[in-house]
Every structure is written in structure tokens, then in C-alpha cells.
Image: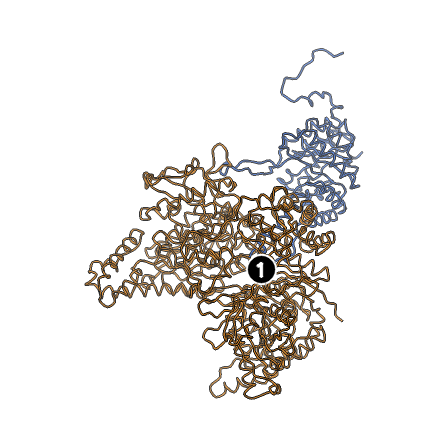
Chain colours: A blue, B orange
Amino acid sequence: MSLDLTTRYLGLKLKNPLVASAGPLTGDLDTLRRLEDAGAAAAVFPSLFEEQIEHEEMEIHNFFEFHAHSNAESRTYFPETISYQSGPEEYLKKLELAKQSVSIPIIGSLNGWSDGGWVRYAQAIEQTGVDALELNVYFVPTDPTLSAADIEKQYIELVARVRESISIPLAVKIGQNFTSLPHFARQLSTAGADGLVLFNRYLEADINLETLEYHPDLVLSNRHEARVPIRWIGILRDELDLSLAATSGVHRSQGILKLLLAGADITMMTSVLLIKGPEFLSTLLEEVTQWLTDNEYDSVEQLKGSMSRGNCADPSALERANYMKALVSYTTQD
Amino acid sequence: MSNRNFVTVDGNEAAAHIAYRVNEVIAIYPITPASPMGELSDAWSSAGKENIFGTVPDVIEMQSEAGAAGVVHGSLQAGSLTTTFTASQGLLLMIPNMYKIAGELTPTVFHVSARSLATHALSIFGDHSDVMSVRGAGWAMLASNSVQEVHDLAMIAHAATLQARVPFLHFFDGFRTSHEVNKIEQLSDADIRSMIEDEWIEGHFSRAMDPDRPVLRGSAQNPDVFFQAREAANPFYADLPQIVQDTMDRFAKLLGRQYHLFDYTGAPDAERVVVMMGSGVGAGEEAVKALLDQGEKVGLLKVRLYRPFDCRAFLEALPTSVRRIAVLDRTKEPGAIGEPLYQDVVTALADDEAWGTDSSESRVRPKVIGGRYGLSSKEFTPAMAARVFEELKSESPKRRFTVGIIDDVTHLSLAWDREFSTEAEEVTRAVFYGLGSDGTVGASKNSVKIIGENTSMYAQGYFVYDSKKAGSVTVSHLRFSPRPIDSTYLVERANFVACHQFQFLERMDVLATAEPGAIFLLNAPFEPDQVWDQLPQEVQQTIIDKKLKFYVVDAIKVAREAGMGNRINTVMQTCFFAISGILESQEAIGHIKKAIEKSYGRRGETVLRRNFAAVDAALDGLTEIKVPAKATSDLRRVPLLATEGTDFVSRVTSMLLAGRGDLLPVSALPVDGTFPTGTAKVEKRSIAQDIPIWDPDICIACGLCALVCPHAAIRTKAYPTESLNGKPKEFQTLAWKGKDLPNHLLTVQVAPDDCTGCGVCVDVCPAKSKEVVKHKAIDMLPKRDHLERERANFDYFLTLPELDRRELKTDTVKGSQLLQPLFEFSGACAGCGETPYLKLLSQLYGDRALIANATGCSSIYGGNLPTTPWSTNSEGRGPTWSNSLFEDAAEFGLGFRMSVDQKRSYAEYLLKQLAEVVGHDLVEALINSSQESDRDIDAQRERVGKLRKLLERCDRPGARQLSEIADSLVRRSVWIVGGDGWAYDIGFGGLDHALTTGRDVNILVLDTGVYSNTGGQASKSTPRAAVAKFAAAGKTVRRKDLGMLAVSYGNTYVAQLAMGANPAQTVRVFQEAESYRGPSIILAYSHCIAQGIDMSTAMTHQKDAVQSGFWPLYRYDPRLAHIGEHPFRLDSHKPKIPFEQFAMKEGRFAILARSDPKQAEALFRLAQSDIDDQWNYYEQMAGIEREISSSPEGNNHHEP
């Protein structure tokens, strides 16, 4: 009997659990095709960042208006008639083209900023014909009067609003810093999320010692980071009836297998493919296939969640947050 | 039947619309106020817009107007329909080709926004002195008086020239018509096509140079035939008036607007008639109507076809009843019997009287007087026109007069009745005061368009700007009327006044034009119930006295909440429509939104959404204030009349500052355009919101803040500790750390009322607090919290003694910044990248510098009245500055050098002649002093002083003359300053020549890579991939390497620098260039608003320019070759960041990535290879040994 690699994610049937996450490789048609050729089951297109679009639109507006009509000799400083692209149109066109260029499912991704923006752009992305939408939500709280509940409420309302406005499957990509992730995840599910993507890796600022300034920078992940989604997917798998995608630190086939064991429906990767090239995905796929074959699995479905918190032998290891010696029991518990 | 639109456009667009459609080639060069015609054509061409023949006109920007005229001539000869646009000096540069074009009977139309010629001063404003200077060139001259006429007569000119073969100069008044926005009926393409017969075009084609039908044209002729050949063209001129009239008649049939060569309006039995042309006709016509209503027998004759002057048509248009004629000329021809139009009218009448015509039988010979009006856009109002009619009534009128000024010297002026007004009741007249940066003018133009294009009403807009580039005040004059508006003068009686900036109330009388009962809308940053108490008492009183309806809105608050920052334009516009009653409020809001969509639609949804939000929130913030019965405010308007300064400053400059320059009589002004320097310091504009505040505890006394300050508004001064007497309590000091100045203190001081708040000083400040990193040795802090203290500190700072420059090490940044700047408080843009170089120049050599300044930004912030930043030290010495033209600064400065040397030569001759009186030792010392250092120069000055004393007692021949020119024995520093438009393009020929002369001139190119002053047109310094006007798709060729061209001469000192990247190299370059006794050229990287950058961090950004290799730093010093060293030295490191990383921080490059990503990618790649290639080249240059044989010293024998 042949090995069945298929998996279901957000209601989509995927040919295997290896998906390219949002990043520069999926935003380029050439590398996107290479990913497909390498066996990627789906790809998440890079996020449309509402803030960036708004910022750029306003920047271009200010660029043309800067010192305009201020002086008798110079009404403007730039040729006004050049046609330029500042809004989401170019992004959407590219997304549409990406969808048409490959046969694997394409998942749109959106980082909104304003209340109206999330809905408006979610609908616009849906119009391009993508198979699903991933909301890339993050918020760095700095206001001490804002409670965790307040913030969670904002997320929930946002997901509900987007859910109402589109009909394609909806995933929500979140960070790991929630006080009670299972509770929050359940709320997201109730609000209409079809899946969760765990976890978002934030742009972290570094300090330049010469200039004493912060420099926001994204560093590539390393394979050890997969431990975090392993834990939370393992915990969430049994509690929630929704799709779970693992992302962060997916570098090796071992990691992929571990994440699937914990309960991930798919694993998403970018860093490793940036380092080793899109074709490395096929190596990973081969290794996963080989391991499954070697270990006599029939299907990925079999593997998925077989080590979730409920299915594993010792869930306390998942729950333990700090180093201490394993609690050894000397007798059989009654 | 054509489908015609009503559009609201300005005169330039009205002309360009026609010109573009009927031409195939357009060659232009930017010049105010004609530039927009070329820019529009270029923009249309870039967008692929077709002319009526189905092709896209090829538009080219040339290196000068002379170049443009050459291209036009060539293109015409090769058979294409070709045009150009220009004004003023530009037209003068075209004259040689104009004679050729006419001599060869070549049809074309030049559209001219008529502008003053530079005489005693440059003026960008309008009069007929330029067009009158070409009246001998053999061109037909057609005058348009309004925006609609510009459109119509442009068409008539293009049609007539093709038929007649005589070229046409179509002109209209610069600014008053070129920049007035008015509602006009636009000709459709079908209209335009039907005005032009195919056979005329075919005729033009058939005369084209063509090797299949070869001809010889442009021959040289001898006395035998030149004369006859010149006369051979006569029939074409003879036929021309009829052709023009026929064209006008055909036009009338098509469009319904009938024009004649001369159009008369007024009483059929008029006894007094004014003859004039240009925009003044609008005011003249209103005066005639008003006088007719009073029963006076007056009329106005409008001249349309000025050349050829058709006497018959003129006489036929003139009522036979006329007894007196006043001819008004908008030009001055000193020494002539009268101005040109006057002379033509007199000649026509005299000819008629002497020889008779058909109409002469019944005509009583009228008496003619001639007057000048409106030079340089001086207002010409119906009251002035009425006064001219009044003068014609007089028993003995002034036969030569002026109107519009007060002439108390030659008493030519007519005093007019300022109460006379023809403003109609039905016209809404609105005046808006704003800042250049707040969008008031843009919104006002929009309002005109809204009314003009969405309602049956007519609308007119005219905009007045002050001459500052930072914090410039704009005044928009709008009229709305059910009938066409020809009021070609500023609104004098407004029934709506809006003040968009609260602080104006303190400094100007914004309500001066408000009629009783008018509406006053104020943007006030206060709660409505607090506004009244914040008004100066004068404003309160005026509101009460004039019974104004007073509304307020906190527009900044509304705009910020809508995400629009400080751009309050849409908020104020909405409020205007809501309370002016021109349109129903909701209807107006609909139109405003549509207008926003039209204007900004392409800029994206965010821009629209935020603007709409501002519109929607505007009315909620609008409140009518119940005006109290009494003015109770303790606040008073700030007096602008300076109480300090020279007599000239208090008599003249202060009047200009107060906006009352129009009231100055002739006697107040210099006869030859010579003004005192050092006047910017009396003008305390106080425009900054935040100013730099010094913390001596952190300061490392590097001097960078003072070096980069574009306005000399932050300064460093070292002074002996003991000189610190009676200091203000909070005056701060820092002990001087160097051994060079023992027992000295240092103070870093802001000039709080002169600072523009640009923040450049704080950005470059390297000293950060150890505890709170954001706190630097200077921080930008709210001015209001520090103003009083810093005012007192700055006043005290000025009283502290300047250091003796002989004691200073001035070749370092720190040392140079202890020198007194003699260029201070310029009105350049906040954060300007050019002015720090000029300030440094003034610090190092200002007390002995002669500056020849090319026209451009530097001549505007340097020499545009009311004030100049060029200043003097306590001994009265300072840079002496002059601007000749745009194209000739190098030659002009070279002339300075020749003259200075010659004067010195003569002084040496006289010294030798008087050696017995003066003493041989002193003569020897005076002639042979090396004057290499400040110490030497000071010693020479002392010798000159001694010499003068000796000469006082001497009555030998030449003694007095020697005394007069003795200062020429002190070494002079000649500087030639200009931008890249001058150095790379229009002035390159002269600059190139100056370099070859070996003379000791220092050329400073303030290189912004674009024509900054005229609004961002590409120059040959514009880098590859940058977007600029005339390079809308990104400049495709690389920047000309002017530095290496100069290096090729061998004996020229050449350096490229960027102050923000390497300040020490900058100071060194200035020192080396000046000390070199031959020609020097410095290419100074100057950031500019026209690059699309953040001006507050622009100095720091220069580091990226250098680190990317975009702007390598180097010095080429021929002196090194003389001593066997490599003369070319690279002062920057191998590029370490990619061009794209640098470029994407600048709008000029980044916009290309948005507008055309593929082109951007290609050009960025090429730009990177330019950089790589250039670096490779320079590296090799740095290894090249040269033997420079001709020592420049050989050419400069006067200065050892």
C-alpha cells in the first residue's frame, strides 16, 4: 500500500504537509514556480501590509505636495503626470498572477492596520481568486492601561469582522505571547477562524552600538525554534476543532515530523528555503516520506496528532515550563 | 458642431493646450513665468498624448533659450511644425535666431509670458520690456489680454502664421495672465483642426530642406544684393494684417468670439481714449464702463496685432470724435521720445494727418500723451485707468507720465483716487492668507475649478507669494461671478477673508481688504470660546468696526485627526463653501469631494479617505463667534517697522517688510540698484515652532551644528573669560578645552527669531547624553518655552567680542565656526543644502570677497528684496555681491578678477611713482606682501592704512587716486557662485572659458542635480534614474562629469565635496581652492527639496551619497603636480553600500520604482555601473602622475 501524504488544511486537500510560508520566495513568480516544482503543497503569498500601503500613499502625496504652490517660480517640483503605483493594486495584480501561475493552492496574507482596512483588503484579496486567507495579526502593547483582555477582544472582533466579509477559508497567524493561549485560540475559533498559524515571528529591533539607535531587523529562524510550536500544537490539538499550521524553525525533516506528531496539519517554512534554495523542499519531502516509509506509516493523517497532549504517553513534559528533574514514580499509581 | 468644454486653467495652460496640439517639435528651456507651458508639453508628451495630426510631439529641454531657439530654427527648416515658450532674458537669448527665422519667412509661434528684463534688478514679474525688445526682429506680435484670449489668440496665431509665413510672437502678461486661473471655453480638437488648412501645412512641408530637393539657405550676401533681398519679403508683411483679420473672422464664425486687429470699447462719440494692450485692458475696460455710467465720453482701444502695426485698422477702430488720447505702455525705454506703443500711435496719427487716409476727412487731430504703468506686475487698477482719463481732461495734461507709483523726483506720476472702485455687487470676492506649506493656494485653485467647472458661474484666481522660500506667505485672490471676470487686479474689497495661519494676525493686517459686513474665517488653535481673547486688539477692533461675521475652526486639529498632518487645505476649503454662501453647503461638499478625487485620485485610496474625513469633520469644528461690543485684548500686533538698523533700513527696508513697498516714493529707492547689505538681521520672522537648545554639559564643542546651519541661526563663539560681564542669568558657557585659547569660554547660541526650525543642527550633533540617549548637546524644543530667554541670550551673545581671526586655526571645522558668519538669516528653504557652503565662504573670506552670483536659488535668497543675508563685520567689511545674469556668472566674475588685478596694477604703478613720498620700504612691503594668511592680510591692511595717512598730506599727482584704490593692494577673493543649471548647462561655455584663463577665480557650484529655483527641471547634473521635470520617466543618461572636464585642463584646482559626509574635507577644500592662485572649481553636493528628501536629516543622508559612491569626494590640486606628487586625491572610500540603498531614500529615485518598476530596475542597474565605472576611473586617476607645465601664477602676475 502506498504512502498517503495528503493532509487537510482549512478545508483544502493538500498533497503533502509542506507549505511555503509568506516570504520573498513566494512573492516572486519564478521562485514560486520552483517551490511548486520542488513539491510544495501550497504557498502563502507575502502579506499585504495596510500600514505600509497607507504610509506609501501618504508619502507620495506629501512628496508631490512638499513645497508645492509655495513659490512664485515653482508651483511644483516633480512632474505630476507620471503614473505611479502606490496602492494595493499592484500587490493584488501580482497575487492574482501568482494564483494563475501555479496549480497548488495559494493563500493570501493580510496585515491590516485600520478597522476598515482589514475588511476592505480581505475582500480585495478574496477577489483575486486565492484559496484561503491568512490574517497576519500582531500588536505590540506599550500602554499599561490596556489589559490582555482588551487586546484579545480586538483580535476576536477583527477575526469576526473579516469572517463575515469573506467566504474563503480563514486562518489567523498569531504570536505566542498570550496569557492563556488555549482560551484565546478557542475564542478565535468561535469568531470564525478555520485555522491557526503558530507562530508569527516578529521583527525585533537591534541596537547599533555606534549610533545608539534601534534597527528593526528580521533574522532567519533556527531549527530549535520549532520547539515552541511543537508544545502549543501538542496542547491545542485535542482542544480545538480547527486547522493548525506550524511555522517557526521548520528547517529539517525531523522537525516537520515532530510538528506533525504534535498535531500540525501542515508545516510552513521560509528561512531554510532562503538559505538552501527552494529546491531543498523536495529533499525535505523525500526525507519525510522516507521516514514514514521506514516506520511503516500509511499516511500523514495517521501521524498527525499522534503525540498530541491527549495522545502522548507523558503530557506533563509538555506542560513543564522549567527545568527540574523528571518526577520519577516508584510505584504504579492507583 | 464641436463639443466644447468649459475649463478653469491659467494662461500658460491655455496657450500650451493649443501649441501642443498644432506642433510636432517643441524645444524649451525653463524660465519663470513661462516654464509651466514647457512642463505641461513635456508631461503630455511623456504620457503619449497626440497632437491634432495624430503624432506625439517631441519635446526637448535644451541647455539655454539660445539652444532652444537653435533647435526650433533647425526643426522648422527641416519642415516640422515647431514651437517654444519663453520670457524675459530667455527671449533675448533667442533674438539672433528670431531674426533668422523671420528673415527666412518661417512660420512658427513663440508663446511668451511677458516679463521684465533685468536692469537695475532682476524681476520675475510681468511687463512688456522683453517683447518690446524684439519688435525689430520681423515677427508678427499678437497681444492677449485675458486667459480666454490667450487660448483664442494662440489659435489665431498658429493659423495665421502658416498662411502668412511670417513668424508670430504671441504674448500675454507674465503672472497676471500666465498664472491667473480663469474659466474659459476650450477649443475642441475639431475646432483646432478646422482652423488650419492642409495646404498651409503642405506649403511648410514643401519648403523643408530635403536632399531630394536640395537648396541653399542661410547664404552670406554682399552689398550688391543683401538690401534688395531684405526688401523682397515686404509683400508678406503687407498681406499679414488682412490674413490675421481673416483668421479672426473665421475664428468668430466658428467660436462666436470676434476679435479685430484693434478692438474699441466705449462711447461711439468718445472724446478721450486710452490705447493699451495686455492684461491692463481688463482694469481699463472696467474704468471705461464706470465712467460711461457717469456720462463721460470715454473709450478704450485694445491693441491686438501690435506688429505689423496696421495704421488703417488702427484709425478705423478709433472713433473720429476723439480729441485726446493717452497711450499706456507697460515698458520703459529710457531716452526715447516715448515708449514704443506711444510712438507707434503718434506716428500713425501723424502719418494720417500728413498724408491722409479714408478716415482722415472727418477727424479732428487728437492730442496724444504717453504714460508708463505696471512695470514688473505693479498693480494697474480701474482707479488708475480712471485717473488717466481724468488727466486727459486737463487743460495741460502731463505729456509723459507714470501711473501706479508716487514719483517725487521727476514728478511724472499721476495721483489716483484710491476710493474709486468698480467691483460689482454680484461678484463674491475672497482673499485667503496662508503659508506655502499649508496648501492654501492649492485649495484656492481647487475652489476656482469647483465653481468654474461645476456651475454656470465664472471664477477667477490669482495668487501672490512672498519671496522667501522658508515660511513663505501666500495670498489667494478669488472672484466668483455670474458673468465672465476680467478684473485683472487684486481683490481690494473682499466680502470674504480667510486667515489660515493664526500667527499672521500678529504680523500683518489681514483684514485690510475686508469690506464692512464681510465674513472672516480664522483657523485658530484654540477652543472657540477662547479665540476672542487671543486676538490682538487691532484685530478685535477691526472686526467690531467693520461688523464682520466671524467664524473660527481649529483646522490643524481636524486635519491631524483625519491623518492629514498640518495640511489644512480641505478643512478650510469646506468651511469657506459652508459660510460663503456661493453654493449650498451639501452641494459644495459633494463638489469638494469630487475635486479631491480628481486631484488626488491617482495618489491612492488613503489620500482620498483622509481628505474626505477632513471634509466631513470640518463643519463640526466650525463655530460662529458672537462678536463682543468692545476690544478688550491686551495683545498687540507686533510692529514690523524696524527700530534698529541704518537710515535706509528704517526708511525703506522696514516698509518692504511691512508689505507697504507700494507706498514708497521714487526718491526712496536707489537710482542704480545698489543696496546696503546686512539687512536680513533686522527681519525677525520667528517662523520656527521648535528651536535648538544647548546643553553645555554634553557638548563636545565640535562646531558641526554651526557649520551645517543653513541660516546661521546657531553659532559658536569663543571669547576671553573676562569679557563675560553682565550676562543674562541663564546665558550658558563652556570652558574652552584647547590649549590654543587659554582662559576662554565657548557658547553655542541659537538666534531664536531667525531659526527656521529645520533641525539639521540637532541631526548632526554627535554628542549624546550617557543617561538619556535621545538627549543631545542640542535638542529641538518648543520655541514658546524658550523664546524670551534665548532672545536675551542671543542679544548678549552678539555683544561678546569676536575672536581675532589672526589667532585662529581656521582650517578646521571647529576653528572655522568661531569666525563670524557674514551670510546670515537667509530666506532659503528650511534645511537648505546650499547655504551652509556660502556661510562657510563668508566666514573664511567674507571680509575680502567679491561674489558674482548666477541667477537661481542663491540669487533669490541672496539678493531678493526686501533683505539680503550678505552681511558685514564690525569694521564694515563683508562680501560685496552682484548678480548679472543666469548665463554669464563665470564671465562676470572673471571680469571682477581682471578689474581687481588691473586696479592693483595701477596702484602698484602709482606706488612706485610716489615711492619717495611713501617710502621705499613701505612700497616694497605693499607690493611684495605674500598675503597668504589672515595675519599677512591684516598686516597689509595696516600698511594700506599707513599709506593713506601718508597720502593725506601729499598733493602730488596720483596721490588722491592711489588713496582711493589703495584697498586693492589687499588680496581679494573672487567667487563665482551658481547652481548646476548654470554650471552644467546655460553657463557652461563661460565657465569652461574662465577655467582656461588661468586667472584666480573660485567657482562654487551648489550642485542640487536639478533646476531648483524654477521647480525641478532636469539639468545635465541630474543623475541617471532620477525623476525630474523633462525626465519624467527617469533620467536615462548619466550625470556629466564636470569635475573631470575641469581636471582635463591640468591647471585648475578641482574638488568635489559633501559637507554632511565629510565636513573636514569641505573646510580643507575651501582653503585650498582659495589659496590656489589660479582657477578653482568646487562641486558642492547640495541637498534640496527638489530631490524629495527629508530635509531635517539631509546632511546625515549625504553620508549615504558618499558611501554608495554616488558622490565620491576628491581633490585635484595642480600644485601637487608641480612638486612631483599625484595631483588627484580621492577623499572617500570605495563604495560600500549599493546605489539602490541610497537611492530608495530619495523621492526622486523612489518614485520611479513606483511609476515604472522595470525602467527603475534598468536605470538603477545602469546607475550602479556608472558608479562602479566612475570609481574605477577615479582610482586610476589617483595613481596618475602629471606634469603641469603652465603655472597659473604665470597668468596672474599681479598677486605674488
Q: Quadrant of the N terminus of chain B?
A: bottom right
Circle count: 1
Q: Residues within 10 Å of mark 1 (few under 14, many from 20)?
A: many
Q: What chain does badge 1 belong to? A: B
Location of residue B784 with respect to B292 vertically, above or below = above
Give residue A134's position: percent from left, percent from top: 72, 39
A197 is higher (above) or lower (below) than B25: above
Quadrant where the image shows the C terminus of chain B: bottom left
Nearest the viewer among B586 and A306 is B586
Residue A47 in the image: above or below residue B154: above
Residue nearest the viewer, comparing B366 with B791: B366
Task: State the image coordinates of residue A214 (x, y, percent, origin top left).
Answer: 55, 37
Which residue, given by chain and number where applicable, does mark 1 sit on?
Answer: B1029
User: Residue A5: x percent and y percent?
Assistant: 76, 35
* Vertical arrangement, residue B1097 with respect to residue B454, above or below: above
From the viewer's perspective, is B306 left or right of B1047?
right
**x, y (%) of residue B726?**
37, 39
Q: Amino acid at mark 1?
A: Lys
Position of B385 with respect to B894 (left or right) is right
Can see residue A44? yes
Q: Is any atom of residue B205 visible in this view? A: no
Q: Residue at x 49, y 82 (%)?
A: B220
Q: Nearer the viewer, residue A222 or B685?
A: B685
Q: Secondary structure at mark 1?
A: loop
Residue at 29% from the left image edge and 53% from the top image edge: B938
A20 or B536: which is nearer to us? Answer: B536
Locate residue B702: give its quadrant.
top left
Residue B177 as seen in the image, left or right of residue B664: right
